[in-house]
Image: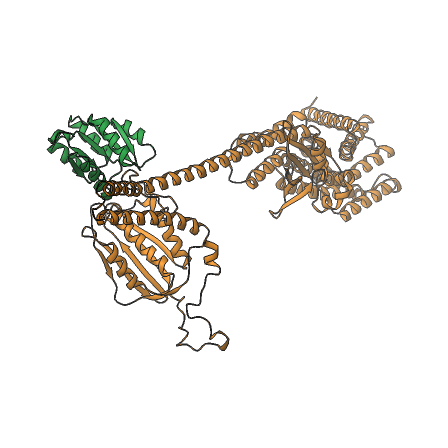
Amino acid sequence: MPDANGDATILVVDDDEAILEVVADVLRFEGYPVATAIDGAEALDAVERQRPALVLLDMRMPRVDGWAFARAVAERGIELRILVMTAARDAAGWAEEIGAQGYLAKPFDIGELLEAVRSQTGAA
Amino acid sequence: MSADDFLWLVTQAVFLAVFLDVSIEAIRRPRLAHFDIALFFGAIVAIIAVSDAERLLGGTTHPVLQATSYIAVSALPYLALRIVDDFAPQSVWLMRVTTAVFALLVVAAIAVPQPYPTLFQILPVLWFILLGGHASLEFLRGAERTTGVTSRRMTAAAIGSLLVALVFALSILTLLIPSTAGPTGVLTRALALTAGIAYFLGFSPPQILRRAWQEPELRAFLGRAASLPRLPDVASIRREIERGAAASTGAPNAALGIWNPDRERLVYAGVDGQLAEFDGSDLIGGRAFREQRPIFSGNPSRDDPANAELYRSNDVGAILAAPVSAGERRLGVLSVYAPRAPIFADDDLELVRLLADQAAVVLESRGLIDEASRVQAREEAARLKDDFLSAAAHDLRSPLTTLLLHAEMMKRTAREHPEAPAEERRISTIVREGNRLKSLVSDFLDAARAERGRLLGRLDRVDLVELANEVSQRLATKRHPVRVQASAAVVGRFDADRLAQLFDNLVENAIKYSPDGGPVTIGIGSQGHQARVDVSDVGIGVPPEDLAHLFDRFHRGTNVDDRRFQGLGLGLYICRAIVEDHGGRIWAESRVGEGTTFHVELPLNAEEPEPETAAQPVETAHAPSTGPIQEPAHGAADA
């Protein structure tokens, strides 16, 4: 069980509210503190308020997309662990493109989601 | 020696040299035209010889010399017309009259006692002036009809004929008014010399001059050849090659037969633009194609009697044909036609072979370009399909993720807390996402149906305003209010489900491309037999260059960031199919950054009287009232 302090928070970013909701749901069920954002702009606000341990980042989003978010984060000198979460065929390529630590290709099940999160947060 | 004497000497030398040259040519290549030309110059040389003999005899005349000179002068108009005929066919009666006049003059030359009366001396000269003028006109006409070397030769011959006629006119003047002999003497000789040279160049140009005269057209054709394979169609390429071959050889016509290996036929373009097919060994061209060697025929009707009528009716008296081949590959045959053989020189066959080789390069390049574009089209189709499948997979994955995760969560809950009540929230989400998947799948199927024109089902009475209100209620949100503007019901016969889909798609599209929120307006009205629906948003808009392709399958706007707006680009494609299958039209107006309006026009005249209110013929009174128009076997075909 991770600590309940801010550093363990997982930020989930997706414009698909249904996915946002259920992914947050699963993570909370596992005991992770979770924050959510509907696009890159909200995610940026969240990151500046409270540094998350991990960001699950959808790439295609209206207004500020995944690439813009990653750029903005880098410009601010913020270091983040990011898992790209996308339905696109080239998930691995996009992850590499923005310097993310890994990726989750949609559709994924609970096992894949938790394994990916654990590998990044180092918590069992 | 006076200048006059010198000029006369040179003139004589030129005519003698030309006579010798054309005589050798006639012996080496015994053809009618060569004999006629040799005889013509022979007659001139005879006249010169007689006048020299008279001079040597001290100005006295001898009866034999006098008669010889007279006959030679009489022969000139006859021979001149024969030469004209050798290049440009003359009417039969003119040939007969000229022959008869010549025969009469010969008989008269022997029969009339010497010295000849002045009027009698003038007769053949007058006759020649007449025919010389005619020949000159004929050659000029020939020059106009032909191009390149032939046109230049004809012009030279026309000048020669005109000058000879002038020389004879001056000689009549001298005969009638002997005092003019001095002043006109020099002029006569100068004209005669020029005429001789002109005739020589026209009728028997040395090879080096022929080449020089051919060069501009040949050079122009070869210069253009590189751009020919890129012409829009094979017909244009064919036309250009034929034009270039005719111009280069100076022939009035050329024909490129292109081998169709599937049908095993040589395909030519007829005069009317229609294609004409011939057997691979038919015509002189077919023979050259079959034997894979260039062929010259100076008398196609004799060499290929089976097609004699065709040659005669097309005024083809000579053909040069050379196979068009690329290595082992036989591509076709290039034939050059002229009404008369003397238009061509013997080495023109070599020129036609060169042109045929050039044609082969052009046709081969064209083949390669066609093959390349076929490959490109195949690749493009494959890429489009690939894109479609990838986009389809992408769109299906998101709802699938939600569905999967919720279902798994429910499974866990059920396992750990079997007594807990069903999670209503998760179940509704699963149902909603399931529906989303369903609608995506039906979009794919609709696109496939639209492709085959089988989109519409039964037509029913539909009020467009009512339909718009339903759609508005279904799709409006706080961020995207949907307003319906209409003053009265607009009723027509439509496929209700498809029209609902059309409204849904247009409104969903308006919402999707208004990411910052904003109202969507559905305006509905009618004018005459047309219903008009306008769906407007205040979204990102469509750049002008995309408006035309907006309704194409898989098309997405250039300002639509693929990473921001998911979608298959099928929605508007399906919309267009729905509208057009109803007999209407759809188009869009837009300003980037200000919004887009989709306009739909649908015909209302499909509305027919209700069976119960209108007088129906007895035999159709039992028809079901479900609507007069039924798509035959629609359900079965689509099942």
Which quarter of the figure has residue B482?
bottom left
Q: Colour of chain A?
A: green
Which quarter of the figure has residue B78?
top right
Q: Position of residue A35 (x, y in %)?
A: 16, 37
Which is more toward the observer, B166 or B226?
B226
In the image, is B506 to the left or to the right of B284? left
Q: Could you tell me if residue B280 is visible in this image?
A: yes
Which is more toward the observer, B152 or B97?
B152
Is B617 above or below relative to A66? below
Q: Colour of chain B?
A: orange
Is B442 above or below relative to B387? below
Write the residue at 18% across / 34% down. Answer: A11
Q: Position of residue B273 (x, y in %)?
A: 60, 47
Is B625 above or below relative to A108? below
Write the residue at 40% across / 53% down. Answer: B577
Describe the colour scheme in one phrase: by chain
Image quarter (top left, top right, bottom left or bottom right) of the N terminus of chain B: top right
Which is more toward the observer, B336 or B73?
B336
In the image, is A4 to the left or to the right of B433? left
In the image, is B437 to the left or to the right of B271? left
Q: Position of residue A108 (x, y in %)?
A: 30, 36
**Number of numbered tags placed on the structure image:** 0
Q: Position of residue B231 (x, y in %)?
A: 51, 38
Image quarter (top left, top right, bottom left or bottom right) of the C terminus of chain B: bottom left
Which quarter of the figure has residue B625?
bottom left
